[in-house]
């Protein structure tokens, strides 16, 4: 089997007769015309080769689904209008009133707020667990639990969990509960950081792999999209029904942008990984910095699990400033950066930064006192990015 980077470029696609371009075609539709009523009745919207209505897919979205399934090492893929909608789709597909879901305390924030808002209103309870302690997950699993989210590494603070150990805890619970509760607990991994390149979510044991295609697969900072990939057809069918009933769909033009991004994705991932590691390592030695969080750094929480399970790392690292530096000085540092723009998201060509107040978004204790800035490294020259951080560090003392 060839490397994923090769597979994503040489992926099966049937072009129109006599037009074998290197890029797949872009098709757009609400209405799809049937040759007769019998064909209308025969075609099943669930099948990927039968076109029934734009909402249920086009040749372009089916091509993208197939490539994302390959990227994740899964079988089935559904596309959603954003990474967040892919997360909430999984919640809605598996949870009903009276159920409980477990989310890592360090998970992507907006996914937590959907659980605290709508899901709570619908009578679905929630507990946050410490992803760095499989025993904490074991203690919180109970008869009501139906869905456990996993995320590697944690959002912003980048602790790398032992995913196989967390999955083993859920599998042991399922084995014990099988007779009393035929409905097993499903594990869903937010794989945006690994992007299908750093590790295979299914080989580490997850049932469902979700990705914000907004990040690496797009790579341009110009499209929002999410994906939900499974290997198990029963899980896929459950999610597909919910996806159809919610009326989720993505546009042909946005799909084209993601298809285009996939070909260069492995190279971009490797280049941004190397640049982020170089900057993170250098930043550790700067006097203003108390800690640099990046799973490839030996002092970062979960480094051993990252080293065992990953082939690479994404473009993110966070800097914790020394406690004597005020939030005002840290904000001034961000304002002084010229190449790192202030903005959410990551994995595009432009480097970005965001200051975060971790204490405000976590229920578990956070070991650091100083303020934190999350950096997302783009594709600029590393020496320019380092010089930019150096001048902004110098400027923060005069704020
Ligand atoms: C960005 C992100 C999302 C959400 O993606 P959007 O397309 O911005 O909605 C979900 N999870 C993680 C880990 C992310 O980084």
Image (tube, grey):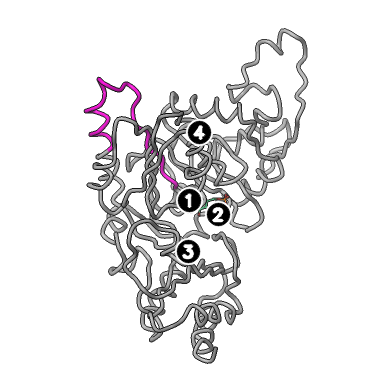
Return the residue at label 3: 315
C-alpha separation, residue under disc 2 versus residue under disc 1: 7 Å
Mark 1 beta carbon near ligand 1 (under 8 Å)? yes
Mark 2 beta carbon near ligand 1 (under 8 Å)? yes
Crowdedness near tag 4: few (<14), some (14–19) or many (≥20) residues, C-alpha within 10 Å: some
Q: Earlier in the sequence, mark 1 or mark 3?
A: 1
Return the residue at label 1: 192
Do tag 2 and tag 1 residues touch (Cβ < 8 Å)? yes
Q: Earlier in the sequence, mark 2 or mark 4?
A: 4
Return the residue at label 4: 122
Determine whether the residue tagged by mark 1 lies in a helix, strand or loop.
Answer: loop
Return the residue at label 2: 215
User: What span is colored magenta in the figure?
Assistant: 170-190
C-alpha separation, residue under disc 1 versus residue under disc 3: 11 Å
Q: Locate residue 176: give its quadrant.
A: top left
> Residue furthest toward the top?
38
Comparing labels 1 and 4, the label whose residue is closer to the camera = 4
Give the left or right position of residue 146, taking residue 79 as reference. Answer: left
Mark 3 beta carbon near ligand 1 (under 8 Å)? no
Comparing labels 2 and 4, the label whose residue is closer to the camera = 4
């Amino acid at each position: 089997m060839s490397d994923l980077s090769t597979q994503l470029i040489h992926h099966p696609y049937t072009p129109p007769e006599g037009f074998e371009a290197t890029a797949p075609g872009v098709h757009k539709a609400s209405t799809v015309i049937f040759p007769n009523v019998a064909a209308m009745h025969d075609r099943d919207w669930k099948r990927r080769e039968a076109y029934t209505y734009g909402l249920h897919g086009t040749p372009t979205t089916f091509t993208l689904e197939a490539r994302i399934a390959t990227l994740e090492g899964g079988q089935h893929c559904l596309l959603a209008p954003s990474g967040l909608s892919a997360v909430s789709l999984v919640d809605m597909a598996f949870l009903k009133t009276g159920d409980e879901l477990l989310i890592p305390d360090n998970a992507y924030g907006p996914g937590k707020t959907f659980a605290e808002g709508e899901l709570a209103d619908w009578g679905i309870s929630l507990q946050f667990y410490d992803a760095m302690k499989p025993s904490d997950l074991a203690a919180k699993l109970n008869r009501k639990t139906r869905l456990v989210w996993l995320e590697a590494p944690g959002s912003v603070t980048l602790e790398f969990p032992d995913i196989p150990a967390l999955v083993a805890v859920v599998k042991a619970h399922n084995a014990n509960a099988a007779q009393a509760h035929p409905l097993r607990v499903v594990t869903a991994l937010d794989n945006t950081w690994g992007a299908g390149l750093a590790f295979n979510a299914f080989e580490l044991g997850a049932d469902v792999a979700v990705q914000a295609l907004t990040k690496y697969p797009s790579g341009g900072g110009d499209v929002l999209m999410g994906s939900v990939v499974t290997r198990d057809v029963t899980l896929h069918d459950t999610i597909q029904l919910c996806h159809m009933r919610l009326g989720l769909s993505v546009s042909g033009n946005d799909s084209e942008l993601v298809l285009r991004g996939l070909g260069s994705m492995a190279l971009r991932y490797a280049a941004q990984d190397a640049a982020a590691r170089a900057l993170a390592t250098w930043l550790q030695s700067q006097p203003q910095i108390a800690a640099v969080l990046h799973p490839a750094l030996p002092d970062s929480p979960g480094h051993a699990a990252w080293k065992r399970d990953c082939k690479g790392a994404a473009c993110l690292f966070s800097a914790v400033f020394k406690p004597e530096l005020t939030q005002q000085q840290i904000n001034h540092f961000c304002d002084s950066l010229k190449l790192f723009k202030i903005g959410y998201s990551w994995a595009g060509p432009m480097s970005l930064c965001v200051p975060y107040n971790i204490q405000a978004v976590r229920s578990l204790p956070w070991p650091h006192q100083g303020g934190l800035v999350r950096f997302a490294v783009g594709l600029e020259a590393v020496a320019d990015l380092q010089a930019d951080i150096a001048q902004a560090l110098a400027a923060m003392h005069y704020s």
